[in-house]
Image (cartoon, grey):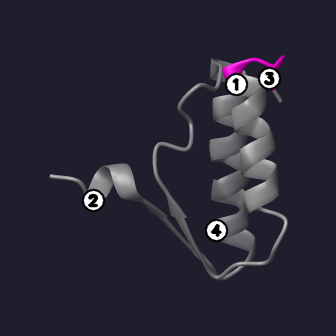
Amino acid sequence: MHKVSDGQRRRVQICMGLLHPFKVLLLDEVTVDLDVVPRMDLLDFFKEECEQVWLCIIDLFLLKL
């Protein structure tokens, strides 16, 4: 993992986190280090998952005051 970009590393981390089923997903700056296209793809994926499956996604960034 030392010879990959920060964006590639972030994508691997996200994939590893999504391997297991979840009902609640806590995210903290999940799109940091992602380029525009992968960022939009990831957000679209989360939106589709929320519409198709009963689950809750909480972005911790929005909870910080």
Residue 39: image location, x then y, percent: 64, 32
For the residues labelled 2 and 1, the Cα–Cα distance comes to 24 Å
Upstream in the sequence, badge 3 or badge 2? 3
Q: Nearer the viewer, residue 41 or 7?
A: 7
Q: Point out which mark residue 7 bears.
A: 1
Q: Point out which mark residue 50 bears.
A: 4
Within 10 Å of the Cα at label 2, are there few (<14), some (14-19), or many (20+) other Cα atoms?
A: few
For the residues labelled 4 and 3, the Cα–Cα distance comes to 34 Å
Q: Point out which mark residue 2 bears.
A: 3
Amino acid type indicated by mark 1: Gly
Report helix, strand or loop for mark 4. helix
Amino acid type indicated by mark 3: His
Q: Nearer the viewer, residue 64 or 51?
A: 64
Upstream in the sequence, badge 1 or badge 4? 1
Within 10 Å of the Cα at label 4, are there few (<14), some (14-19), or many (20+) other Cα atoms?
A: some
Q: Nearer the viewer, mark 1 or mark 3?
A: 3
Quarter of the image with the N terminus is: top right
**Seen in the image, is 4 located left or right of residue 45?**
right
Amino acid type indicated by mark 4: Cys
Cβ–Cβ under 8 Å for marks 4 and 2: no
